Structure formats: structure tokens, C-alpha cells
Image (spheres, rainbow, N blue to C red):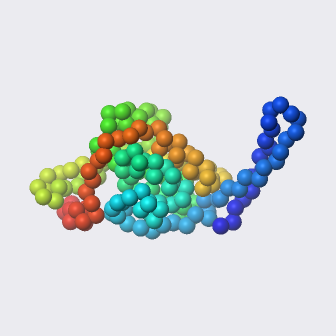
Amino acid sequence: MEREPVDISVSDGDSAVETEVMVVETPLEQVEPIKRSRALSVESIEDLNEIIEAPLLKACQLLYQRHIPTYESSANREHIRYKYPTAAHISIVGDGLSEENLAIVDGMIAEGNRYGYVVALHDPASYEPLYRVMITFDVPMEEKITLEGIERKSVHFAERFVENPEIKLLDSEEIINIEV
């Protein structure tokens, strides 16, 4: 992966001597998409390495550790190629969030960096409707968006959440057998 260098001057604050450090950032154009199904079950944090693109991996791992399930995420060169309005997004499952995490989501909504939608599913046993609230947080597109920039913003987003009680989600087989 070819990276674009960024120069940063660093000073220790007490002396007039400055040291130049070369920080290498990876343009989003160089991040390949991972084309895997949204219906995959995640059994362990290691599974995320196979389905989450590098810019969002740390944030999704943190959400996983805090029992906040993600439905989908995306941060790759197709966001630029197809002129998406966002450079990246993470969708979390809103059902089952603790009161404290719902308050955090409400705060984020007030900041204007989300959209939410409801996906109607049916319980495979009773055919009663289930509603899964998806809350999507976007990283806005910028002129020189990088893997590291997206990673910083997405980790900041994930760090705002507190540990959530575990949520029982439908596994892949249950989702496949749902009649909508």
C-alpha cells in the first residue's frame, strides 16, 4: 500500500530545537473493500478481522468488547469511486442498548451525526413482528480522507459507549429462515 507522507514539526516546549517527524497516512483510495455478507455470525473478536475494513476495525472491536453489536460497516475506496457523501459508516443495533447507552445515542443524535432506521423482521417461531433499530454513524467525506483519520474518528465514536449488557441476536441460520 503506497502512503502519502505528512510532515509534522515537534518541539519539546523548552528548547528552540525542533525535530521533523514523517507521519505516513494511507489514502482511503488504497483501502480495498471486503465483500462479505451482513448475515455472518461473529463468534469471537478475531472474526472481525475477516469482515471489517481496516479503518473501522479498532472501533468495531471496541464496540464488540462493550457488547454493542454492529450490523454493518464500510470504509473503502468505493466511497470515493461512487462519490458517496460519507467516507465511512458503522451501523449498530439499537435494540437492547442500556439506558446509559441510549442516552449516549441521544446525545450523538443531537449533534447531528447519525441517521436511524427500523428494519422489520419476523420471529421465526411465532411470526410475530420484531423490530430492530439500526443507528448509523457516519464519517463525513473530506478532501484528503485517510485510513488513519477514519480510524481516529470511529474510535472516538466507539469510546463514547459504556459496557452494555449482552444482547441475544438472531444467528445467521435464524436470519436466513425469516420470512419478511
Res. 163 image quadrant:
top left
Res. 175 image quadrant:
bottom left
| Residue 64 appears in the rendering | yes
| Residue 79 appears in the rendering | no
Q: Nearer the viewer, residue 161 or 30?
A: 161
Task: Answer left or right for 46 relative to 171.
Answer: right
Q: Residue furthest left?
A: 126
Viewport quadrant of the N terminus: bottom right
Q: Is residue 53 above or below residue 16?
A: below
Whole-percent x and y of residue 167? 29, 47
Identity of the residue drawn at 58% across and 63% down: 31
Identity of the residue drawn at 38% across and 66% down: 37
Whole-percent x and y of residue 44? 38, 58
Whole-percent x and y of residue 23? 73, 52
Number of numbered discs: 0
Identity of the residue drawn at 44% across and 43% down: 114
Whole-percent x and y of residue 25? 68, 55
Identity of the residue drawn at 32% across and 33% down: 99
Q: Nearer the viewer, residue 115 or 18?
A: 18
Q: Nearer the viewer, residue 58 or 135?
A: 58
Viewport quadrant of the C terminus: bottom left
Task: Answer left or right for 131 relative to 59.
Answer: left
